[in-house]
Amino acid sequence: MIPSIATVCVSGTLQEKLEAIAAAGFKAVEIFENDLIAFPGSPTEVRRICGDLGLTIVTCQPFRDFEGMPEGRRQRVFDRAERKFDLLQELGTDLLFVCSSVSPEALPGIDRLAADFAELGERAGRRGLRVGYEALAWGRHVFDYRDAWEIVRRANRPEVGIVLDSFHILARGLDLSTIGTIPRDKIAMVQMADAPLLQMDPLSWSRHWRCLPGQGDLDLAGFMRALVSTGYDGVLSLEIFNDRFRAGSARSVALDGHRSLIWLLDETARQIGKPVPGAVTMPPPGPAQAVEFIEFAVSEAERPGFEKLLRALGFTRAGAHRSKEVDLWRQGDIRIVLNSEADGFAHSYQITHGTSVCALALRVPDAQAAITRAKALLDVPHAGAIGPGELDIPAVRGLGGSLVYFLDKASALGRWAEVDFAATGEAAGDAGLTGVDHVSQSMQYEEMLTWLLFYSSLFDTHKTPTQAVLDPGGVVQSQVIESGLDGAKGHGLRLILNGSQSHRTLSARFITDFFGSGVQHIAFATDDITATVARLVSNGVAMLPIPENYYDDLEARSELSAQEIDAMKALNILYDSDAGGSFRQAYTQTLDGGLFFEIVQRDGYAGYGAANAGIRLTAQARLARPITIPAPGHG
Amino acid sequence: MIPSIATVCVSGTLQEKLEAIAAAGFKAVEIFENDLIAFPGSPTEVRRICGDLGLTIVTCQPFRDFEGMPEGRRQRVFDRAERKFDLLQELGTDLLFVCSSVSPEALPGIDRLAADFAELGERAGRRGLRVGYEALAWGRHVFDYRDAWEIVRRANRPEVGIVLDSFHILARGLDLSTIGTIPRDKIAMVQMADAPLLQMDPLSWSRHWRCLPGQGDLDLAGFMRALVSTGYDGVLSLEIFNDRFRAGSARSVALDGHRSLIWLLDETARQIGKPVPGAVTMPPPGPAQAVEFIEFAVSEAERPGFEKLLRALGFTRAGAHRSKEVDLWRQGDIRIVLNSEADGFAHSYQITHGTSVCALALRVPDAQAAITRAKALLDVPHAGAIGPGELDIPAVRGLGGSLVYFLDKASALGRWAEVDFAATGEAAGDAGLTGVDHVSQSMQYEEMLTWLLFYSSLFDTHKTPTQAVLDPGGVVQSQVIESGLDGAKGHGLRLILNGSQSHRTLSARFITDFFGSGVQHIAFATDDITATVARLVSNGVAMLPIPENYYDDLEARSELSAQEIDAMKALNILYDSDAGGSFRQAYTQTLDGGLFFEIVQRDGYAGYGAANAGIRLTAQARLARPITIPAPGHG
């Protein structure tokens, strides 16, 4: 199949849109009529620009309210169609894209509609053009692709085919099996869109909430399986109406679009176990099995303070890099790399973002396969400076210009800690932290779908629905991506993506005041949170104070004993539970740069303590903005 | 009735919320349990803070999943209730607010539920407390206030009453007449929320889209009529979950909240023609009959250029202020005041915002009544410096710190132009502009509901639903407020409020780059747009170029003759029509400060040319950002 995208998906003027689409590697484009009308040059000029950019124009759409017109109005729609044929020919394209009528004047009757399309097909045929018919989910009489197909079948013209749009079909929950019965030469083109599951009217849902394949919850896999069974190998075009994309960077959205189609074709081929026309050959997505290490870019000046904090958290300086100003710190299965090199990637990152997480290294089954897959998905590889005998760890660019490294146990990369670092032999100062439970990244709201797609296309992942979390400064949208969770503690990858349209939330202020988009918080696992936090406190780590009211409320609503609650209260530990078990969590106070740490004890529980998020965010907001409480006795 | 607000309505920590609520003049508050739990002091301390701020605590809510529990779980909910009674007593309040259970464990059966409430009432009574029961629109068994009322009736305890919430009742479209049958002493409290009409599930609608009375589309008037018929005079409390409010200023939202309740009580009294307990006496809302004048704050340096533009637009310098550096310019019924005073309000406005509209003067039937009403609605009056013999024009603060003046024909204010200005006798240079058709104001997205309420509480207005307008840089939300339209041209007030969550739209860039929130565009009416625009062009006014493709498309889709279309094309005039008639519009290019003018000819048409907005915005974006088109022949 041929990846394509509609100009309506991205922001900007038509010229800007086309340039962004070409830069993302597309070879085909659907021009939206409104973009053409607003363009200050002729259709011939648009054709030339597309030609210069290497873009084939698939169609210029839509053509609305055509079929079913009463006798007195019928001639007029055919006149309009002839004008549109002129335009299509000027643009050098051949497909008239008709979406089902929403006109209150339109009459029903499948044979009437078929007759309209038979005549339209004949007229198109005289000019060597084609006609595609799409059932809008909110069409007046035709809103089911099976009805559109029956009309196309009865029109019985070689020029007339059906347009299948995944959104219009899946939004109505239509049975997909009829797709498999449509001859491939009767499918004029296919449009792809995903969407989150929302309970709202289909028109608003479609106009504002569509998203790229892989970013939503629709059964695109089922749609693609049915489509592939027809032998279809034509255009597969993205048609996404999304307010975030309209407000975002055209280049970024177009690149995401291309990535989503490459992913979708690969995913489809993998599911049906057969080659799919147009699919790129690449290794399958593997799990992210663990966070192998977290790398901080640290300035020389801030390094002593940061090292002191790591020691207080129970970490030990376990290794010194053989050629660089880089140290390896360890505790349990957690490895933290501190990079204070005076040049190179981490240095530039530190200059731009301050002391912060500049890279996440993920353990995968096969690092070479992961980087090969990443490249096939248009991710941007990164190559750093490597000393003699040191490992060349494959990496791609991630959120906010940080890096994602791939490491495995199977190759020499499995020995990265020994190869690149000389052991210090320092004694362990263990506080009971066993692994990285999860990492949360704060990003611009408009970026959230980009990074969701980045992770979910690269790895074998599971995502939760977006959740609204209440910060005293506004709503934060939060979405969890999980990969490689094998039930064992501290294994796999749990990532939380946070974005906020308010400028006053902790998440938004992190981006504005501190680092830009990046890792804001790291949660470490422990098997005994009480012992761990007690140790941290005695080491001088400032924990986030939790109000006493929280524990009074917990006592009222939970089955915990007063003793258990008192123990948590003493250490500012929060509690949650689900069907699987219980969860305990505590937070350090926020560092100057906006970063903070969490300690969690997970006993069969699957979530992240969302019920406690408001308490935590309010406590953090209070520390960020000191508040004067009026003195008593003035009432 | 006693105006109250729930702490959940506004942003911030509990302390900040309470201070904002008190500053807005509220005397009563509902504390949301989550705010209390996140507060780092005891309930007694909250009670003291509220006391210091002059706030009575109405309740601390909610109490969830109480009724219908199976035998084994039943004791536990009563234990929880006793704990909550303790808390209420510590807070110094007396109402336990129970919302209908959503627990999957809850059993149905109206007598079972009534028995639960009878026992709860008895327990509450022992402590001198009360119980209120609210039917959530998504309750498991009880989601209709009539069922809640039947349960309260059968519980038959003096301590147990119903809580009526306008959202939960109106969102389900329930019949309101049963409200009138509830004895006033059985209504424990009333919660108020409005909402825009959206087709989505009630839970999401409620949690994110509620708004203040007057800002939405629910039949609050009908609800209030029914409520007043019971003789109820208790607490009327705002409970608004709204993402914009959560991201906005707590003080501004609290003030809007108080204004909305004052407005609602006044509106109710007016509709039923009888006094309503707690309503503030104020003059009725009148129409805004016309834009009497528009005042620009202009720097001395920019004045010659601005005057040149006014002349080119056909305006004449008709008067000179008797004591100030202020001129009056006229054309048809349009009056423009240029203020270049070296001190005073316009001067400070110009310093902050650059050359821009600093005031709108609106003609009303009675200016004194209008300012009296404005003060009753908590609007902020403004008093400027007045020379001897000059008029004291009543004014209030409007959007972005600009002013709204009130003028009438009945008082001496009707002669403002003659009293304050000496006629220059300059010959008219008429371009055929007859009046102000509409004015558009760009504002922060979070401010839109504030200014909607400001205008709609002050005047007798009609508002359209919010519309999404597509700018190449993102979506702009646009809402129209109309007042005093009497069918005659150029009369009445038509205001467009624009706000955008994207930072890249024309509207958002106006706020960021130029003036801050304020008037971005003024549309003048003409009876002959062809003659007017031809004149403007010959006077050297640069009009916004409209692409030829627009006219080709117009020819294909409209009934206009080629001749008519050619005439419009020659002058960059856009066209639209509705059931009432036709509409023609043309735009000047944008001035340095971001302001632009529109010329419209309205022949029975009621809208604003929304269908053309995308074309216009793209043309404006293109001029704002020059684009290189690749040279031909490189393909």
Image: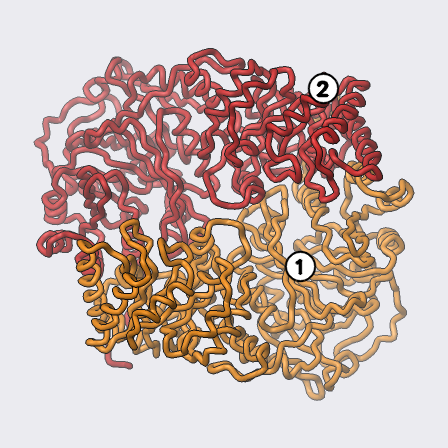
Chain colours: A orange, B red
Residue that badge 1 annotates: A440
Q: Residue farthest to the top?
A: B275
Give the labeled residue for mark 2.
B156
What is the distance, in whole Å, between disc 2 and disc 1 at their CAs? 52 Å
Left or right: where A146 falls relative to B23: left
Task: Place residue A557 in its image quadrant.
Answer: top right
Q: Residues within 10 Å of mark 1 (few under 14, many from 20)?
A: some
In the rendered image, residue A138, in percent from the top left (x then y), is placed at: 40, 54
Q: Position of residue B336 (x, y in %)?
A: 23, 32
Whether discs 2 and 1 lie on one chain: the answer is no
> Badge 2 sits on which subunit?
B
Left or right, B262 with reference to B389: right
Q: Is residue A30 left or right of residue B252?
A: left
Label 2 crowd bin: few (<14), some (14–19), many (20+), radius 10 Å: some
The chain to which mark 1 is attached is A
Q: Which amino acid, mark 1?
A: Ser
Observer able to see residue B31: yes
Mark 2 element type: loop
Quarter location, residue A222: bottom right
> Residue B446: where, in percent of width, then height?
48, 41
Q: Helix or strand or loop: what does disc 1 sit on?
A: strand
Q: A623 and B586: which one is in front?
A: B586
Q: Is residue A456 left or right of residue A245?
A: right
